[in-house]
Image: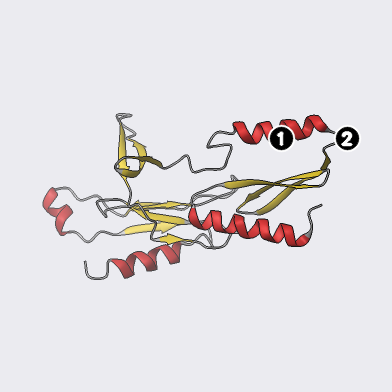
């Protein structure tokens, strides 16, 4: 087992990585103390340990672990694979239900809401480049319902679209950050 001070130092590095990469899903790390290796995975629910591996008694585990770290792709490293980057910046791909056509929704480079804690939902919100949409990305358990934003009504004409106040209903489970997102959005668009 890693000494407590070493685990705390690793946790600080993990917190810094989650702060710099707020949409990251998890982070891998390991300790090597004398002849003992311990593998760690940190996600938004906390840290998980492999337990101690004696590299002299189980050298094949040590070699497999190091080789695996060296060969991980972005998804296995816990990097965000939902948003993508190109020379024009960050975007997500959205499929239209009726046609199946894929469109790129451009996002602002920096999120306007991000959580600083490691053990949390990791909610991160980006505005679309045209400022018409907010994209909320958060870590969720597969056992939780996800919050959804739905337009309350659909204007019939282009003139109605321009004149109508834009209203959205945001719903989801308690503690999912709905109020935080709405307050930040209202503050930023107060004048409009």
Q: Counting other residues with Cα less than 10 Å from the Cα at mark 1, is it few (<14), some (14-19), or many (20 or more)?
A: some
Q: Quadrant of residue 65?
A: top right
Q: Earlier in the sequence, mark 1 or mark 2?
A: 2
- Where residue 43 appears, as percent x and y from the top left, is 62, 50
Q: Secondary structure at mark 1?
A: helix
- Where residue 139 appears, as percent x and y from the top left, is 54, 50
Q: Secondary structure at mark 2?
A: loop
Alpha-carbon span between mark 1 and mark 2: 15 Å
Residue to which mark 2 is pinned: 57
Residue at the spot x=60%, y=47% of the render? 27
Residue at the spot x=72%, y=30% of the render? 64
The dot on residue 65 is 1
- Where residue 1 appears, as percent x and y from the top left, is 82, 52
**Quadrant where the C terminus is found in the figure:** bottom left
Q: Quadrant of residue 163?
A: bottom left
Residue at the spot x=41%, y=56% of the render? 125
Q: Nearer the viewer, residue 176 or 44?
A: 44
Direction from residue 161 to residue 43 in the image, left or right: right
Residue at the spot x=29%, y=42% of the render? 88
Q: Is residue 121 visible?
A: no
Q: Relative to residue 112, is residue 102 depicted above or below?
A: above
Q: Quadrant of residue 131?
A: bottom left
């Amino acid at each position: 087992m890693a000494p407590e001070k070493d685990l705390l130092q690793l946790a600080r590095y993990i917190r810094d990585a989650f702060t710099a990469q707020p949409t990251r899903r998890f982070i891998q790390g390991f300790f090597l103390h004398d002849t003992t290796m311990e593998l760690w995975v940190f996600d938004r629910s906390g840290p998980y340990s492999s337990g101690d591996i004696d590299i002299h008694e189980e050298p094949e585990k040590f070699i497999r672990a190091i080789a695996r770290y060296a060969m991980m792709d972005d998804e296995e490293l816990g990097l965000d694979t939902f948003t993508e980057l190109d020379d024009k910046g960050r975007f997500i791909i959205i499929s239209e239900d009726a046609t199946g056509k894929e469109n790129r929704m451009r996002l602002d480079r920096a999120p306007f809401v991000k959580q600083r804690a490691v053990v949390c939902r990791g909610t991160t919100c980006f505005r679309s480049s045209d400022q018409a949409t907010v994209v909320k990305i958060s870590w969720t358990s597969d056992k939780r319902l996800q919050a959804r934003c739905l337009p309350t009504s659909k204007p019939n004409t282009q003139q109605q679209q321009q004149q109508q106040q834009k209203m959205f209903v945001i719903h989801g489970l308690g503690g999912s950050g709905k109020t935080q997102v709405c307050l930040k959005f209202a503050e930023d668009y107060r004048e409009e």
